[in-house]
Amino acid sequence: MAKQSIPHPILVTPRLRLRQFHTDDVDAMHECFTDPEAMRFWNQPVYTKRIETERTVRNLIDCTPSYYRFWAVADAETDRCLGLVNYHDGHIRSRRVSIGYMIDPARHRQGIATEAVSAMLDFCFGELGLHRLQAFIHPDNSASIALAEKLGFRREGLLRDNLRVGDVWRDDLVYGLLASDRQSPA
Ligand SMILES: CC(C)(COP(=O)(O)OP(=O)(O)OC[C@H]1O[C@@H](n2cnc3c(N)ncnc32)[C@H](O)[C@@H]1OP(=O)(O)O)[C@@H](O)C(=O)NCCC(=O)NCCS
């Protein structure tokens, strides 16, 4: 039986349509996953083979809504995939999840992530009724830090050697956003 029994929620913003991934998104995501800059702080090394992206996109289509879900960040007019947002590493019953995001480097610094992640935050706090969202961010990932702070996340601490990527252990900053932070920003 398929894991997902309810339709994937579609989130609409002025420029974007966040929807379920499909196999036609492989080309667009391959540009992200093979880009050293986009992958510099990702939890996997840069991809070198198309089959790696094909396998990943199959996993992005799949979801277990109570634990993780991916959205393709698509251009509202053309439906071209510009990247991904996701929540993961949680159980909805615990009302806490972690989030992630990646945008095509050709479209960086155009407010795409701000628009897409904001829509996902609204969904997580609104539809899912979550209490806490968290992001684990490498201390040198200034783009992700700027995005998280712009969205109201607060820096809560540093986890040493939190993630192993290839042969390297990496530190992560912990950023957290509570539902109440959104109602009354710091
Ligand atoms: C992090 C990421 C998703 C941001 O995407 P984006 O669409 O360029 O972000 P936005 O345009 O919405 O910018 C959000 C804020 O971050 C700032 N910002 C973006 N890139 C930045 C950079 N390289 N350095 C400093 N600030 C940056 C923007 O100026 C903006 O703040 P402002 O509106 O106050 O100016 C993108 O850089 C990315 O995909 N990185 C690779 C994947 C990754 O590392 N994901 C996070 C893992 S934790």
Image (spheres, rainbow, N blue to C red):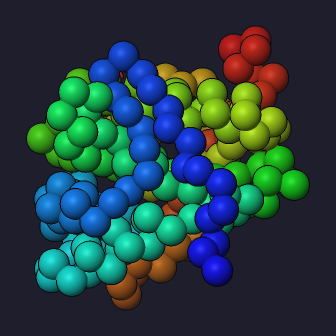
Image height of 147 relative to 165, above or below: above
Give residue 110's quadrant in the image: top left
The reply, left or right, for residue 133 in relation to residue 16 is right
Q: Residue at x 59, y 50 (%)?
A: 7
Residue 76 or residue 165, whichever sits in front:
76
The picture places residue 129, in percent across and down from the top left corner, at: 80, 36
Q: Where, quadrant-wise, is the N terminus in this rendering? A: bottom right
Residue 157 or residue 121, whichever sits in front:
121
The reply, left or right, for residue 106 in relation to residue 114 is left
Image height of 161 relative to 155, above or below: below
Give residue 114's quadrant in the image: top left
Q: Ligand 1 is located in which of the four quadrants?
A: top left
Image height of 46 relative to 32, above or below: below
Give the farthest residue toward the right: 93
The number of numbered discs placed on residues in the rendered structure image is: 0
Residue 140 or residue 28, whichever sits in front:
28
The picture places residue 128, in percent across and down from the top left corner, at: 75, 40
The reply, left or right, for residue 115 in relation to residue 4 is left
Q: Residue at x 52, y 27 (%)?
A: 118
Image height of 109 relative to 87, above or below: above
Residue 164 showing in the rendered view: yes
Q: Where, quadrant-wise, is the C terminus in this rendering? A: top right
Q: Residue at x 36, y 84 (%)?
A: 166
Give residue 93's quadrant in the image: bottom right
Give the farthest residue toward the bottom: 167
Q: Residue at x 25, y 46 (%)?
A: 81
Residue 35 showing in the rendered view: no
The picture places residue 137, in percent across and down from the top left corner, at: 49, 52
